[in-house]
Image: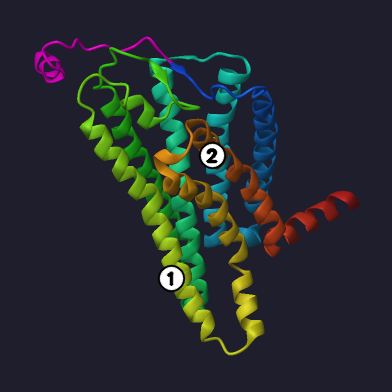
């Protein structure tokens, strides 16, 4: 412990705050209506993702490697929405901005774990589409149930491990100045920047996380669709190209919804107003879990057929 305290500096005493304060949005009138809107988004997210998970679980025809990834995406969206939105409503709608130190780190862990799983899930689905279009005759040999389950499980283990390390590094920081987090939740960056001692390891990890959970998955998805586009270009007829590309429309929609707000935020950088940045990131966190199940229900023939069949059976009974 003496070594640890000396690492903080001779004139700095290690301080672990009792609580943090979530600043949220400042200077925006009538912003409570936004949190009422969040409540609506959360209800739609829970219902939509529950329906998708139930349909995939109940319909044996949908128990394919692709729908294992879709099921996991719906589960991640449901878990992430439940970790984030109710706490946001409690913090801002009911003005409970104080959050204990341990609760804040737990909140951070669950939110970032679920948010980080989404890009990996989309990368897994892009790999599925890549093999299905480029190697259709070998698809069932290359993309098996075991392969997809192992891939999803490895993503979970990796994401959980990385964020446990991130939380562990936060516990070595001393907070002797402000405890006000300039974000809409217990965000990793705004927390470590409040520290009095050296937060270089936290900064390096944060930069690495941006590459691991944003740039690398996005680069893989873009490269996959470049290969898919090249494969479709060699297809003889326009009808065959359209038919093959149609199987990718749902996934492309999910990629756009998940990545475009983040790309805008990163491009704007420090030039974006703090409130604009927070609003953009909050929308990027809450909208995909609501829209993902809607897109898959509307654009995926197998899920639409399964839901229609079950509705028909229930109406007859």
Task: Farthest residue to the front: give it.
Answer: 271
* 255 and 58: which is toward the camera: 255
Q: Is residue 273 magenta?
A: no
Residue extending furthest right?
316
Task: Residue 17: say if magenta.
Answer: yes
Circle 1 residue? 142
Magenta-tinted stretch: 1-20
- Name which residue lies at 52% across and 52% down: 260
Label placed on residue 280: 2
190 or 105, which is in the foreground?
190
Q: Secondary structure at mark 1?
A: helix
Query: Tag 2, which secondary structure?
Result: helix
Residue 173 in the image: state x and y as whole percent.
25, 21
Point 65% across, 55% down: residue? 296
106 vs 238: above or below: above
Residue 118: in sight, yes or no? no
Where is residue 44, by image quadrant? top right
């Amino acid at each position: 412990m003496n070594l640890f305290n000396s690492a903080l500096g001779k004139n700095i005493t290690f301080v672990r705050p009792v609580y943090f304060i979530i600043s949220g949005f400042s200077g925006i009138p009538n912003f409570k209506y936004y949190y009422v809107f969040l409540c609506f988004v959360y209800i739609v997210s829970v219902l939509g993702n529950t329906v998708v998970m139930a349909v995939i679980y109940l319909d044996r025809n949908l128990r394919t490697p692709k729908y294992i990834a879709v099921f996991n995406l719906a589960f991640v969206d449901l878990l992430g929405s439940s970790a984030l939105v109710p706490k946001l409503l409690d913090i801002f709608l009911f003005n409970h901005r104080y959050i204990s130190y341990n609760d804040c780190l737990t909140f951070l862990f669950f939110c970032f774990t679920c948010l980080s799983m989404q890009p990996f899930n989309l990368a897994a689905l892009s790999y599925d589409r890549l093999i299905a279009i480029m190697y259709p005759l070998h698809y069932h040999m290359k993309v098996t149930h075991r392969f997809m389950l192992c891939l999803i499980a490895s993503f979970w283990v990796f994401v959980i491990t990385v964020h446990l390390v991130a939380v562990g590094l936060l516990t070595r920081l001393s907070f002797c100045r402000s405890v006000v987090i300039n974000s809409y939740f217990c965000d990793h960056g705004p927390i470590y920047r409040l520290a009095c001692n050296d937060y270089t390891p936290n900064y390096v990890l944060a930069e690495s996380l941006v590459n691991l959970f944003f740039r690398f998955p996005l680069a893989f998805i873009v490269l996959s669709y470049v290969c898919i586009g090249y494969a479709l270009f060699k297809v003889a007829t326009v009808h065959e190209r359209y038919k093959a590309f149609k199987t990718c429309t749902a996934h492309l929609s999910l990629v756009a919804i998940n990545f475009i707000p983040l790309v805008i935020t990163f491009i704007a950088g420090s030039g974006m107003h703090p409130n604009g940045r927070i609003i953009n990131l909050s929308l990027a966190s809450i909208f995909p879990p609501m829209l993902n199940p809607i897109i898959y229900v509307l654009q995926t023939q197998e899920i639409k057929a399964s839901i229609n069949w079950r509705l028909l059976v229930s109406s007859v009974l």
